[in-house]
Image: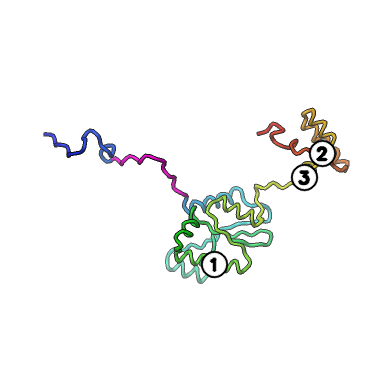
Amino acid sequence: MTRPARPGRDPAVSPAGGRGGTLPPRPGRQRRPLPSERAVHLQVAEYLRKVGLGPGAIALHVRNERTGTWQKIEAHRMGILPGCPDFVVISNGRCGFIELKRPGWSRAKARSGKYTAHELRQAEAQRLLKLAGCWVETCESLGEFLGALRRHKVPLREAKIETPVITALRNALTQAELEADAAGSYTHAVREIGRLVQRGEDLPPLHAHLFSPRRRGQS
């Protein structure tokens, strides 16, 4: 004996895709979830571990998180600053701090105007650090983290440092380079310029496009 189907429902078609299934996704574009604050922190930490900063600069994480009543009491006895930002950056005698947040945090807080007790402690810590002469930034991605370092003149390892000779070669022009450029010989031009440098002769401006990777057929 078969059980009759419920009224208004086709027994041959299951909206959940069968027993134990899930409803099909709604039509339209699905939004990708934003990274968490921990994910942003790990991206920054991985960049600092694999790439690092330029000469004379160092960045390190300030471990301020504590769990349990005893750990919090012991941390305060050891002299932590409640709400201290995540990273301290020291470069050329200057000290700065960077607090990491999840993407969209600043916009959400500006819209709601509501802050947790922990976020208020962070704001107070940042105020004290600024009064002490440090720069303080809040970043929501690795890109913003690197942008803050550039704004405060922290050297990055990705920045290429040119020697004075190379700078002179890029900004000078010689007859030998012109002739070599006409012949399409980049190597010949560099050799001729090198001879002038060895003889200590002044270099007039060079064609910048001669040193371009596209000009040399590189990708």
Residue closest to the eye, 172 or 166? 172
Disc 2 designates what residue?
Answer: 173
Place of residue 144 in the rendered image (x, y in percent of width and height, measured from the top left): 57, 52
Q: Amino acid at mark 2?
A: Leu
Q: Is residue 185 left or right of residue 27?
A: right
Highlighted magenta segment, given as a residue range: 21-34
Mark 3 burial class by Cα count in 10 Å: few <14, some 14-19, many 20+: few
User: What distance separates the C-alpha of mark 2 from that of mark 3?
Assistant: 12 Å
Residue 167 marker: 3
Q: Residue at x 60, y 57 (%)?
A: 59
Residue 8 marker: none
Q: Is residue 11 left or right of residue 68?
A: left
The quarter of the rendered structure image containing the C terminus is top right
Q: Amino acid at mark 3?
A: Thr
Disc 1 designates what residue?
Answer: 125
Mark 2 burial class by Cα count in 10 Å: few <14, some 14-19, many 20+: some
Mark 1 burial class by Cα count in 10 Å: few <14, some 14-19, many 20+: some
Local SS, label 3: helix
Inspect the magenta stretch and tell me whether residue 196 lies in it: no
Q: Amino acid at mark 1?
A: Ala
Display colour scheme: rainbow
Mark closer to the chain start, 1 or 3: 1
Place of residue 97 in the rendered image (x, y in percent of width and height, measured from the top left): 58, 61
Q: Residue at x 62, y 64 (%)?
A: 134
Place of residue 142 in the rendered image (x, y in percent of width and height, measured from the top left): 55, 50
